[in-house]
Image (tube, rainbow, N blue to C red):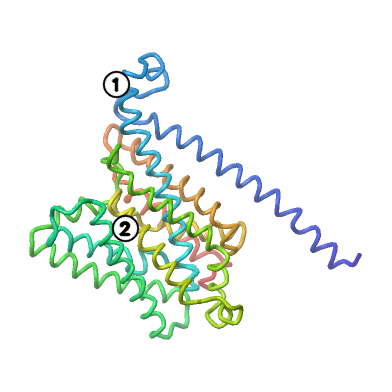
Amino acid sequence: MTALDTASASTPTRERPRRTWVGVLVGVLLVVLAGLSLFVGVSDVSPVAVLTGGPGSDAAFLLGVSRIPRTVAVVLVGASLGIAGLIMQMLVRNKFVEPGTTGVSEFATLGMLVTIVFFPGMAVVGKMGVAAVFGLVGTWVFLQVVKAVPVRQLVLVPLVGIMLGGVVGAVTVFFAYRLDLLQSLGQWSQGSFATVMQGRYEFVWIAGVMVGVAWLAADRFSVIGLGEEFATNLGLDYRRVVAVGMVIIAVITAAVLVTAGLIPFLGLVVPNVVSLVIGDNVRRAIPWVAGLGAVFVLGCDVLARVVRFPYEIPLSVVVGVLGAALFLWLLLRRRSRAH
């Protein structure tokens, strides 16, 4: 056996235990934080109160109506937004994009404003559908802008998306201000799980279904991440796969918008952290991104509830602060792709 064979054989042996331990750590954190999310809050909902009070107690009622739906919604939102960011990065072939930095979230918010103005009595599922259509249009517009604008550096791509989102967001705020709908729009777009309860969170399961679709098409997303010519030479229908990815991103963004609002930076930092651990294979990365995204949002949600107890800080504020710090670390680290 040559030295090269020995090195290639020994490398996975060193990396696999590290990946295994990281995966175990993510799983343990997910269970622990989910347990904390169930029993942290102003009302006395503790294991002792639930067990001693029985199924008919106030603690059991709050656990079933509020705490469990909120925890499930947080897990699904964290997992689905992480996957949306991963798919967006494969479509654009850029590690510094996500729905919040490409204008997709702003287009979905514009769609929400359209429903508030023209269809104020529309059901939530209808509002989610309109927001998904606008998010789909926003994804297509961003992809066309990226194709038309020659970009020499990776960090310029999200800057183009941020400018596009800024223009759309300015239009949305202008019409909301003129129509005196800023407060109504803010209630939908503010990232918070404070109002999530039974009967108010079920649409986020649609985002969970989109995660399953992304997992089924994971290998195709890995291929299109190598470029259109490479994917076409392998016999892959590039446009069809891109269309599937656009639908996944738009539906996840709309489902999260009507359930909890806008959560920044999540789809940006989580896939990049996972990429540092296991690489860029989408099929292997999806469970890691889903698990780490759920852990990240669960941790931020618990922190938002306890940092000013008994008051609650909006989740988007906590995720924005921590996500921005992680994003800066990803940009400034010595081996960053931005360099």
Q: Categorize mark 1 by other alpha carbons within 10 Å: few (<14), some (14-19), many (20+).
A: some
Judging depth in this view, the residue of 45 and 117 nearest the camera is 117
The residue at the far right in this view is 1
Q: Return the residue nearer the eye: 87 or 245.
A: 245
Mark 2 — residue?
Answer: 254
Q: Observer-nearest residue: 91 or 219?
A: 219
Query: What residue sits right under mark 1 in the picture?
Result: 58
Q: Is residue 260 above or below residue 139?
A: above
Q: Residue at x 28, y 63 (%)?
A: 108
* Residue at screen point 67% across, 50% down: 18
Say what secondary structure mark 2 lies in: helix
Which kind of residue does numbered mark 1 sit on?
Answer: Asp
Work out how far the residue at label 1 is from the one at label 2, CA to CA, in angstroms.
Answer: 33 Å
Residue 274 left/right relative to 118: right
**Is 235 situated left or right of 243 in this image?**
right
> Where in the figure is residue 295, as x and y percent of width and height?
47, 45
Q: Residue at x 38, y 48 (%)?
A: 205
Residue sitting nearer the eye, 169 or 305: 169
The kind of residue on which mark 2 rests is Ala
Q: Is residue 287 left or right of residue 178?
A: right
Q: Position of residue 229 (x, y in %)?
A: 55, 83
- Helix, strand or loop at label 1? It is helix
Residue ranking furthest to the left = 179
